[in-house]
Image: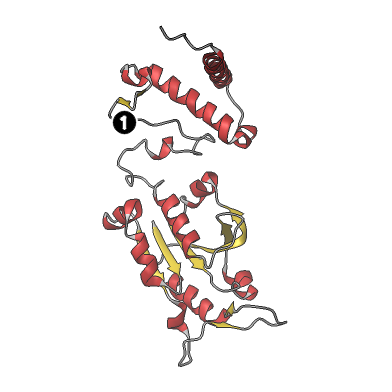
Amino acid sequence: MRFDVITLFPEQFREAATIGVVGRAIANDKVLLETWNPRDFTSDVHRTVDDRPFGGGPGMVMKVGPLKKTIQSALEASDDPARVIYLSPQGRKLDQQGVTYLSQFSRLVLLAGRYEGVDERLIQSHVDEEWSIGDFVLSGGELPALVMLDAVTRTLPDVLGHECSAAEDSFVDGLLDHPHYTRPDVFDDEKVPEVLLSGDHKKIAIWREKQALGKTWQKRPDLLDKKELSPQQKTLLGEYKAELSGSVLSSNSIKLMPSEHKK
């Protein structure tokens, strides 16, 4: 998959993209990353890419001319069809469903804006979609572009070390991920759940699904509102709630027990 990123800070973007999963994907030719600086497509000595907004107001707006030339050059650099995406707080909020959708394209051109944003005429004429990573303000679109690059890359075939890793991530099936444990099996008197040491993969799978359902119910109940649970999942969630309730009752009982008299 190819990503063309339009940014005023190409060196910093590429440096950030060379670590972790994305960096390995680039090194292994699973992902091609190209960066484009709008300043290279200006015609004045100062390489101006922004100007004051019409109508007044604070800040600066990125000019339509340099950005148009940048997008056109990026599109012409490959014969693969591309979706031009503007990272914008006004866009569709990125979630795992959106990541899956974006991963179906062979090429994405990501426009990372700066200042107060970009000239609306560019959005109307050269942008296919607008995407946001959340309802908050950042200094530019580079971090959202990196988030999108990372999220989409890890869904691509042969990118992660284990073929099931991406499928078991949080949100992939509409639930949070189950808890994870590793060696040692006892740490500060806290033991790993016995089922994980049993070697019974069927029981482990059931336990993990129950934990995923329970953690989602505890931490992100809004996700369950969007998901239709199977009868088995409803049973597992009911068991989780009962076990949690019993644990809380047991804990309270211990606290209420009178202390033993010292002999």
- Residue 65 x, y percent position in the rendering: 55, 82
The N terminus - image quarter: bottom left
Query: Would residue 263 be found to the left or right of residue 126 on screen?
Result: left
Q: Residue furthest front?
A: 263
Q: What residue is drawn where x is 52% and y is 67%?
A: 140
Pick the residue in front: 81 or 86.
Answer: 86
Query: Would residue 252 be found to the left or right of residue 149 on screen?
Result: right
- Residue 163 x, y percent position in the rendering: 34, 38
Amino acid under disc 1? Thr
Pick the residue in front: 53 or 163.
Answer: 53
Q: What residue is drawn where x is 49% and y is 23%?
A: 210
Q: Residues within 10 Å of mark 1 (few under 14, many from 20)?
A: few
Q: How is the image coloured?
A: secondary structure
- Residue 82 x, y percent position in the rendering: 48, 62
- Residue 104 x, y percent position in the rendering: 47, 50
Look at the picture and state if 251 lies above or below 129: above
Residue 117, quarter of the rendered image: bottom right
The C terminus - image quarter: top left
Label 1 sits on a secondary structure element that is loop
Query: Would residue 24 be found to the left or right of residue 204 on screen?
Result: left
Look at the picture and state if 49 lies above or below 230: below
Whether residue 77 is visible, yes or no, is no
Q: Residue furthest right?
A: 55
Query: Would residue 8 be found to the left or right of residue 216 on screen?
Result: left
Look at the picture and state if 188 lies above or below 33: above
Look at the picture and state if 60 lies above or below 207: below
Whether residue 174 is visible, yes or no, is yes
Q: What residue is drawn where x is 46% and y is 55%?
A: 147
Pick the residue in front: 169 or 159.
Answer: 169
State how many labels appear.
1
Residue identified by numbered label 1: 182
